[in-house]
Amino acid sequence: MKRNYKVLLLALMLAFASCSFTKKTFDDPDRDKLLMQLIVYVLEEGHYSPKDLNDDFSEQVYASYLDQLDPFKRYFYASDIKEFEAYKDQIDDQLKSYDLSFFNLTHERLLQRIEESQILYKDVLAKPFDYNVDEDINTDYKKLAYVNSKKEMRDRWRTQLKFSTIANYDDLISQQENTISSKNKVKNMTDDEYQMLDSEMRELPKSDKTKDSKDPKEMKSLSELEAEARKTTLSSLNELYDYINERNREDWFAVYLNAIVAEFDPHTFYYAPEDKERFDVAMSGKFEGIGARLQKKMDVVTIMEIISGGPAWKQNKMEAGDQILKVQQDNGEPAVSIVGMRLEDAVKLIKGPKGTSVILTLKKVDGTIEDLKIARDIVELEEVYAKSSTVIKDNKKFGVINLPGFYVSMDDYNKRNAATDVKLEIERLKKENIEGLVLDLRNNGGGSLQTVIDMAGLFIKEGPIVQVKTTGGQKEVLRDKDKAITWDGPLVILVNENSASASEILAAAMQDYKRALVIGSKQTFGKGTVQTVLDLNRMVKNNSLGDMGALKYTIQKYYRIDGGSTQLEGVKSDVVVPDRYSYIALGEKNQENPLPYDRIDAANYTVWNNNSGFQTAIDNSYARIAKNEQLKLIDENAKWVKKIRDQDMYSLKYDTYKTALKLNEDEAKQFEKLADYKTNLTFSSLPYENELMVADSTLKEKRVRWHKALSQDVYVEEALNVLNDLRGPTDIKKVVNNVKK
């Protein structure tokens, strides 16, 4: 029955995503107009809360779009804006008639202003900044007016670049000041002592040396340091403009389309073809290719990281730092140089279907050139998947599962997904005879709705998990129908402000059933909506215009089984623990255009019957928190972080800047011991991972780092304290073999 339910749900989703929009024919020969036509139609017909395309809508899109194009107000002039304003209340009409006039005007003007700015910033950075002048900068750029002249534009660039460079300048001064004590020591050294110091400096790895460390007797003047600071800023801007100049019209049109669709709600988004591919990888945690992370710098594609377990890792002939000069397919076609090519285009050449091969011409780290043939395969991103550990506390063994996301294969649900992985980790942990489980959903932004329904079913006998409501107000209760339970022992769920969507569904369901205690931030993110992803190519017959990308849009709101919503309100923790973001405006309620909060009738469900120890565990937890010096310091740090983030006025006079910076640094010192916090807990990998780590040193290093982080995590420590307080099941072993199939 459970499998039939999944098939039915998937069929309904596919029908909604493809069949319901086939009544209309889309065949505009202009790709951009066709895209606009498709997106407007889908949102008007399929969005949960469609918007009226009117003048108010137009003005909102206008403001959002220009803010995205020029957030620092250092491209467009006031005269440009005056010209654009003719379209301020016309965008809705242009959408209805598929008119691209506004986009074409802004796009052409933006490219012109970007080209002008490249000359401008290089000219500004060619001249020294005077850090003795008493002037300030306001970094609340939304309050800035657009400039009226080239002189004002130059001054805006000068001010902003001076602000960027003063930080570099201070870093260089600080580095040099740190050598002063060494220099003073050098003055009193004998020749033999100096030669020994010089020899030690030469033996340091190249990466550990700085230009100033070659000879502790040499010191640079302030003017030399100022010039070096500008050079650093110039290098950073050159890299930024390399990226900007790689963007084509399709990329900029996607920005315009997203300014439009974002007015419907924060989670409606147009994915250009390359963005859709990245979304699929993020959702599934896997792709087909060679297993290397790449970056482009100075026109050259360089390997940043070899992904553990991938083809390149298994072959062990490629390393981080190698440069890829050419790419050749295994079909006999000539090699293609990728030097100067857009990174996205280079990646397309390197990636490919499992079973095919690619030949890469590499410039190795040592300077040698060689051709390397690699067979492509499925690459899994280990950091995306669930992982588990055991820990001993008060002679009891507990389990910890970290779940970064509710991942699922976009083309086949029965392939690897978060629910089946968590189930497997629980089964492995039970073999280690754990007496309680922590499920860590911190920073888990959600994912597949189906996986969270299946995952919630691992902890209850049967019953509703979440309620969803469509545009017409029709309610549906999504249930776990399998009576088997994978884990019936004590359960604690860790959350924070970035636990969203599917994370909130799971936390809310377990809270409503009184199946688990939720520990963490005051509330979770507050995303109570469901999205689907529509491949826009399905809507165009005989498409000859290339890949149209995909549209993610909101189709439902979801509700707790008690009738409440997590929209805006999130899930309130049973035990609120201070964190460093407690005073910062995060979450759905601080997004643009969120859907409103509301309630519906509760579903019928039966509360878990083994929760008698909950209130005692909560009371004990709050008593510990009140005495915990680490958490008190975290709360003070959170207030300090809020104060720093709210600051928007900075002096560009170095002495004043340095005084303020020194004050901040002095204040920050009281929080340095936060990083020194250690528990007396030791975390261990499970036997199957220990076997894997014999051959995989990368996995071993990642687990060592994770276990160290867990041992310094005051939130995990408190979660384990709560587990220790909770009353266990009547008989843990009775469900060991009663596992969902």
Image: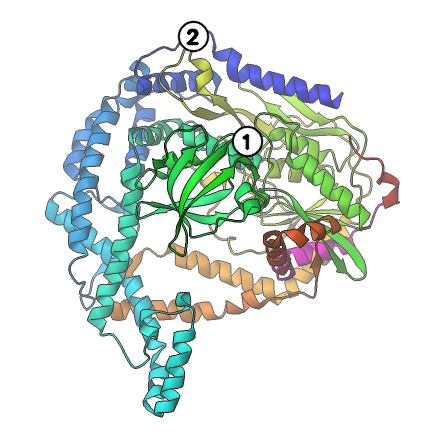
Q: What is the x, y in percent for residue 404?
A: 59, 43
Q: Nearer the viewer, residue 344 or 139?
A: 344
Residue 694 against residue 189 in the figure, above or below = above
> Is 723 within the magenta?
yes
At a point 13% along the width and 42% down the height, the residue shown is: 148
Q: Where does label 2 land, which residue?
A: 24
At a point 50% along the width and 58% down the height, the residue shown is: 638
Amino acid type of the residue tagged 1 in the rendering: Lys
Quadrant (top left/top right/bottom left/bottom right) for the C terminus: top right
Q: In terms of secondary structure, where does tag 2 sit?
A: loop
Q: Earlier in the sequence, mark 2 or mark 1?
A: 2
Tell me which secondary structure the magenta stretch mostly adopts: helix
Q: Nearer the viewer, residue 228 or 617?
A: 228
Q: What is the x, y in percent for residue 309?
A: 59, 44
Q: What is the x, y in percent for residue 420?
A: 69, 35
Amino acid type of the residue tagged 2 in the rendering: Lys
How many marks on residues?
A: 2
Q: Where does label 1 land, which residue?
A: 354
> Is 382 within the magenta?
no
At a point 23% along the width and 66% down the height, the residue shown is: 226
